[in-house]
Image (tube, coloured by chain):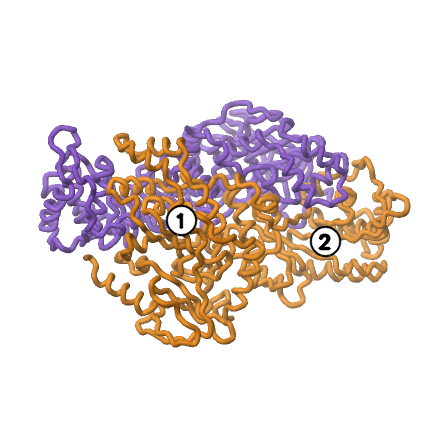
Chain colours: A purple, B orange
Amino acid sequence: MAEQEPEGRAAARPLLTDLYQATMALGYWRAGRAQDLAEFELFFRHCPFGGAFALAAGLRDCVRFLRTFHLRDADVQFLASVLPPDTDPAFFEHLRAIDCSGVTVRALPEGSLAFPGVPLLQVSGPLLVVQLLETPLLCLVSYASLIATNAARLRLIAGPKKRLLEMGLRRAQGPDGGLTASTYSYLGGFDCSSNVLAGQLRGVPVAGTLAHSFVTSFSGTEVPPDPMLAPAAGQGPRVDLATLVEAWLERVCAHLGLGVQEPHPGERAAFVAYALAFPRAFQGLLDTYSVRRSGLPNFLAVALALGELGYRAVGVRLDSGDLLQQAQEIRGLFRTTAAQFQAPWLQSVPIAVSNNIDEEELARLAQEGSEVDVVGIGTSVVTCPRQPSLGCVYKLVSVGGQPRMKLTEDPEKQTLPGSKAAFRLLGPDGTLLLDVLQLAEEPPPRAGQELRVWPRGAREPCTVQPAQVEQLLQLWVQQGQLCEPLPSLAESRAFAQLGLSRLGPDHRRLEQPAPYQVALSEKLQALLHRLSAGAPQ
Amino acid sequence: MAEQEPEGRAAARPLLTDLYQATMALGYWRAGRAQDLAEFELFFRHCPFGGAFALAAGLRDCVRFLRTFHLRDADVQFLASVLPPDTDPAFFEHLRAIDCSGVTVRALPEGSLAFPGVPLLQVSGPLLVVQLLETPLLCLVSYASLIATNAARLRLIAGPKKRLLEMGLRRAQGPDGGLTASTYSYLGGFDCSSNVLAGQLRGVPVAGTLAHSFVTSFSGTEVPPDPMLAPAAGQGPRVDLATLVEAWLERVCAHLGLGVQEPHPGERAAFVAYALAFPRAFQGLLDTYSVRRSGLPNFLAVALALGELGYRAVGVRLDSGDLLQQAQEIRGLFRTTAAQFQAPWLQSVPIAVSNNIDEEELARLAQEGSEVDVVGIGTSVVTCPRQPSLGCVYKLVSVGGQPRMKLTEDPEKQTLPGSKAAFRLLGPDGTLLLDVLQLAEEPPPRAGQELRVWPRGAREPCTVQPAQVEQLLQLWVQQGQLCEPLPSLAESRAFAQLGLSRLGPDHRRLEQPAPYQVALSEKLQALLHRLSAGAPQ
């Protein structure tokens, strides 16, 4: 089912780019350099959210984009309308003919741990084409990686057992922002999303309950066309659920010390309607009127009536107030009610919570002894308010086999020249030691062999002896052809969790972590030194 | 050209919704209430960014979405796969048949000033259908309105004369986030966008310069296939531009007191290549190596060589360092160089700046005497880091003609019941006094007549005597039919600026503004009081 509808991503197409890519394309073409072989690297300079890691994501979208990259007549005509009127028509003929058949992409697999300066993507091919790819690739990778990282942080906070539901579609930057958010928060460690389209197009598990409008739409005077429900086992006569619920309400109110008039009849009618539609998946949203005086007794009456027919309610949701405290109280009332009415299944009905939950609130909800089972997070996973942009860049590192770098007077913005390889060095217990960037032509580091490298920012080299060495950048697209199938989203999700488990706790810590080292080989360091010293040439 | 390619928005479709909309749809259907006439209001509770206003935007996208709303077979099949397997097949037949032919929409025109609690959209129609619309409408309105508001703030800071370029596509939440950002930052007051697709699909003016990769791709040893350029007037022999530039470089370096070897030859080759492609639109990106020792002299040499041929350079861009200070220095050097070489046009070459510009930095760049002409803003306009979500909600206000409200124990989350009309009251000088919400059946306020209203949150009513009264909510879609053409994006942009000019300076102020009052009619206040007191019923 996943991936069957590529038009869902129609907005990612060649003109989804900054105009300067097109003006530069004309400049390259006019200079006779359109076909020069160039290599760009896509990377970030700082880990997001003050953490020490990021997750790489978005490769699948990039590959899909590259494979269909082609300027249609209407696209070329539009470019002609915004470029100088005396532009040589042969340039537009050139644009009509380009595609990614000359483009090669190496990349970190989806869900890999990524660190500053290590390329997420290496893109090589004809200069004009790989320049045009800059903006769309940045757009497809930056946010995907940001939200995957954000989701991974939330998963680390929640621990492995809490169920995390992404529900931020309405807070996203338009339709595709929502689809991207749902897809990559799942990759980063969420369990499911409310976004149906993410289920249909990407295979993300979807989940949902009910909203307050469903509850407020009932006044209690409505007459259901068919209030009858058969027992779960299918045997025995059908029962009028509404009537059965009223009988249970009296017992529940007596148990809770409430007047039978207190629970809102409209809310109860809504719960009965939902139960008739979902007898095997009944859930209650408790806070439309008053949790303790209305939502909870109404839920219990319906759940116990269903229970009498052999059905088990699957959850309650709270969307306001002190979520942790209410969850504790509700669990307590579930237990006493379960005991009172010999309904042991009621004790463990999952409690879901939502309402602007951020990292701090999630930590509170995930504390030892918390009775919260499911946490729905919208705004703070989708918008990444602590840092709403990853700030990836796409920099030229070589042309015609010659290394290139941006020097600038801002050392922060200097780039690392040359076509590179990247390796991850691991200790004997499998934990990550550091990542090494080196020139592509250098032999790879070898397990068990001592290596002298220059940690970035350090004034001295250091030596390291890895027990294992992993090559980081895999060849995915060669001359426009996909070299091997991309892993599924679920596989990438598992890969991300595996990576995180191998990261030392000092680096995995979310607040003030120890930075994970990225080092340069001696040859790369020497090239950097030579090109920096030589400027301006 | 604009709007010709609706597939650019293909991601906004019926399944772009939260699963609970579908589960509630089944609940309504099972309860025999699918066709009940319901009305929802879409509004926000707090103005974003600590300001006192927002701009309403996204209506055009909503109308487009509603007009094509239809569940395809594959959509219904997917829903069937995630709803209970024993769901009555007649429900899915119902889903296959629905569309928005029964839906009516009133809304603030695009670009209107919007305030807390005043509906941006009123949506009425069959309960099941208008419930399903919740998530997509929120998704289409919330971010569009947020970014339009953000852009309007940046425009207020910049003043009317600075040219504002949106260039945040690479920092957006995927392709459509970028398209939405470019479209609605233009509506909010930006002049143009770097996003080519926004130009093609939405008619947003596009602009762009060149990137550092273009500069670093040249080493200076390249031989252009055709370095010859004809004079601008078209008469006279073609000239070797590269040679002419070298001659100018000597004169420029002598004037600036630089050695002729200092400016980077690759950067100069890049500028020459760009000038050959864009003789009438030459721009220089100055900070790839060193602004003063390389970028500036190289730019001046090319600009003066072009000037000799009758062409005028159109700009320079700075992307690092102290942008204001560099702009002042560059303007000074433009002036002395213009005088030195009798090239007065050089004095006023526009200076563009970019590099993580936020509200504070923009205020600095826009100060009296600043020589900055163009400001490119990416991350901070697109991601709205001060508040990355507007938090719009979509709440049921009536069913079957009966008012509905969510009471809850959190007063913040209470809703205003009933089908309403909204009016803006103006003083004799045309400035805005306050907005009034009243029940739909009440007669509208009349100019010159005193009115008693309840400002929200106040314990006492107040009286107001408007000189003018404007109806806020216009009928756009009636029973699925568009009632009048939507204004163009440029018209909405002008409308937004007009609205802001009528807002009192106390409310327009960006930091700690006076809140703009929204008041309830006495009848609406009484209904609210009655329903609040009556709960739980």
Q: Is residue A430 visible?
A: no
Locate residue B296, reporting x and y percent.
75, 52
Image quarter of the N terminus of chain B: top right
Chain of the residue where label 2 is placed in the rendered structure: B
Q: For mark 2, does the 10 Å Cα neighbourhood hold few (<14), some (14 to 19), or many (20 or more) residues?
A: many
> Disc 2 residue type?
Gly
Q: Is residue A321 visible?
A: yes
**Could you tell me which residue is drawn at 32 percent across and 57 percent down?**
B413
Q: Are marks 2 and 1 on the same chain?
A: yes
Which residue in the structure is indicated by mark 2? B315
Which residue in the structure is indicated by mark 1? B479
Q: For mark 1, does the 10 Å Cα neighbourhood hold few (<14), some (14 to 19), or many (20 or more) residues?
A: some
Locate residue B111, reporting x and y percent.
51, 58
Locate residue A441, reporting x and y percent.
64, 27
Locate residue A181, reporting x and y percent.
44, 41
**Could you tell me which residue is drawn at 33 percent across and 34 percent down?**
B93
Which residue is more in the foreground, B422 or B358? Answer: B422
Estimate the spatial distance between the alpha carbons at disc 2 and disc 1, rounded to whole Å. 52 Å
Name, please, the residue furthest toward the right: B236
- Image height of B168 relative to B361, above or below: above
Residue B339 quadrant: bottom right
Chain of the residue where label 1 is placed in the rendered structure: B
Q: Is residue B248 left or right of residue A23?
A: right
- Image height of A268 relative to B423, above or below: above
